[in-house]
Image (spheres, grey):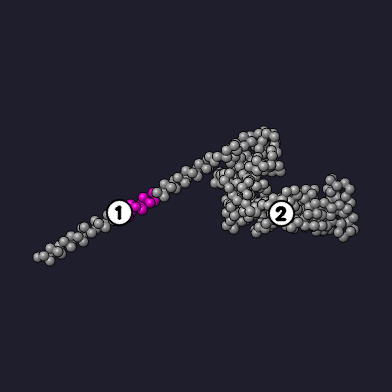
């Protein structure tokens, strides 16, 4: 009888009590993990709120929260929030089709350029911090103008991509030994950038050194060609050097005399004058000082590599590096030697 009672108790335990205990434990485990998930969600919410604040132009640039932009065409000065100004710079300076990391690098570089102009460079413009000309400060285009040049179906997506690149890097600038750098940039380095002293002379900026970049040859800005007849060439040169005379019977009538370390033309001989590669570039309208000369029939052909002065960040190089997996930080540290990215 005792045995039967024992079996009965065991039966009750296995069939009723054990399942109840197990379910309770399981519920406890489930509820713990639910709580854990919800904690993560909460912290994700906090993060999202922070990011949203950053994306709503809430970054505090202190005295530079509003900047004054000079419109060169009209002379009008517009006041606008710093990062809103950068939407117009990034969209004017870099195709929206470029990689996100390249656009972010461009946003940081443009922000640095602006801050440097305001703080360290003295004011170029009397009542404005910066102007909208790429030849003077850095290019800027209004949203309306930009939209007019984009296909209708891509306008919003393109704009959002640029806004995101600026907002996600809000506050960030490039510094060298704690100070904002003079953040030069250009279109295509032709595979190797130029140190600033070879282009403008003067101070040698330690962060503007010559660096090589792979993948630049894949862009249309990489190579170009300009050809002149002998007469055209002489006439062009005479505009700034009336004394020039070229004896075309001489084998070395036109000849590159010296190259810089990055294989750009430092000096070139045209008959009886020697001029700097940078001056030849301006006079002849070449895309860069990285060029070779050849003679074909009656023409002198300048075959040019790269586009722009070649100093600092190459924009196509930035895109090429991003395509190879580089982050904006990698890109910036590649083009500017020994720099840091700091919150300003
Ligand atoms: Zn300017």
Position of 10 compared to 330: left or right?
Answer: left
Instruction: Please state the extent of the stretch shown in magenta in the rendering.
Output: 26-38
Answer above or below: position of 260 versus 175.
below
Kind of element beneath mark 1? helix
- Mark with earlier residue (2, 1): 1
Residue found 82% across the figure and 57% down from its top: 257
Q: Looking at the picture, how far across and down is residue 226, in whole percent?
A: 77, 53
Q: Nearer the viewer, mark 2 or mark 1?
A: 2
CB under 8 Å between discs 2 and 1: no
- The numbered disc on residue 201 is none
Q: Is residue 159 visible?
A: no
**Residue 46 covered by magenta stretch:** no
Q: Looking at the picture, how far across and down is residue 155, in whole percent?
A: 58, 44
Location of the N terminus by quadrant is: bottom left
Q: Which residue is mark 2?
A: 194
**Residue 32 covered by magenta stretch:** yes
Residue found 82% across the figure and 51% down from its top: 275
Magenta region, mostly helix, strand or loop? helix
Q: Which residue is mark 1?
A: 27
Q: Is residue 275 visible?
A: yes
Q: Looking at the picture, how far across and down is residue 125, in whole percent?
A: 70, 36
Location of the C terminus by quadrant is: top right
- Between 271 and 210, the one lying in front of the other is 210
Toward the bottom, the furthest residue is 3
Dot 1 crowding, Cα within 10 Å, few <14, some 14–19, many 20+:
few
Residue found 86% across the figure and 52% down from its top: 273
Q: Looking at the picture, how far across and down is residue 308, in whole percent?
A: 71, 50
Position of 309 compared to 163: left or right?
Answer: right
Residue found 69% across the figure and 39% down from its top: 122
């Amino acid at each position: 009888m005792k045995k039967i009672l024992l079996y009965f108790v065991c039966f009750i335990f296995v069939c009723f009590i054990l399942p109840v205990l197990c379910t309770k434990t399981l519920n406890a485990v489930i509820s713990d993990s639910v709580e854990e998930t919800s904690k993560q969600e909460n912290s994700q919410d906090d993060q999202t709120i922070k990011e949203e604040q950053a994306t709503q132009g809430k970054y505090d640039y202190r005295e530079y929260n509003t900047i004054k932009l000079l419109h060169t065409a009209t002379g009008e000065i517009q006041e606008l929030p710093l990062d809103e100004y950068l939407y117009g710079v990034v969209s004017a300076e870099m195709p929206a089709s470029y990689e996100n990391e390249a656009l972010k690098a461009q946003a940081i570089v443009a922000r640095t350029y602006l801050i440097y102009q305001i703080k360290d460079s003295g004011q170029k413009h009397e009542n404005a911090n910066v102007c909208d000309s790429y030849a003077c400060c850095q290019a800027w285009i209004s949203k309306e103008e930009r939209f007019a040049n984009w296909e209708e179906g891509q306008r919003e997506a393109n704009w959002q991509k640029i806004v995101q690149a600026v907002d996600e890097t809000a506050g960030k600038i490039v510094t060298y030994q704690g100070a904002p750098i003079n953040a030069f940039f250009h279109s295509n380095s032709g595979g190797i950038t130029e140190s600033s002293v070879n282009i403008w002379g003067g101070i040698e900026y330690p962060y503007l050194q010559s660096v090589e970049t792979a993948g630049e040859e894949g862009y249309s800005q990489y190579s170009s060609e300009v050809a002149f007849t002998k007469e055209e060439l002489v006439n062009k040169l005479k505009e700034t050097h009336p004394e020039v005379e070229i004896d075309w019977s001489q084998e070395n009538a036109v000849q590159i005399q010296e190259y810089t370390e990055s294989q750009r033309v430092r000096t070139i001989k045209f008959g009886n004058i020697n001029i700097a590669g940078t001056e030849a570039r301006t006079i002849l309208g070449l895309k860069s000082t990285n060029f070779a000369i050849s003679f074909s029939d009656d023409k002198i052909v300048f075959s040019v590599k790269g586009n722009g002065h070649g100093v600092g960040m190459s924009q196509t190089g930035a895109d090429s590096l991003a395509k190879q997996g580089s982050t904006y930080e990698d890109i910036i540290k590649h083009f500017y030697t020994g720099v840091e990215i700091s919150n300003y």
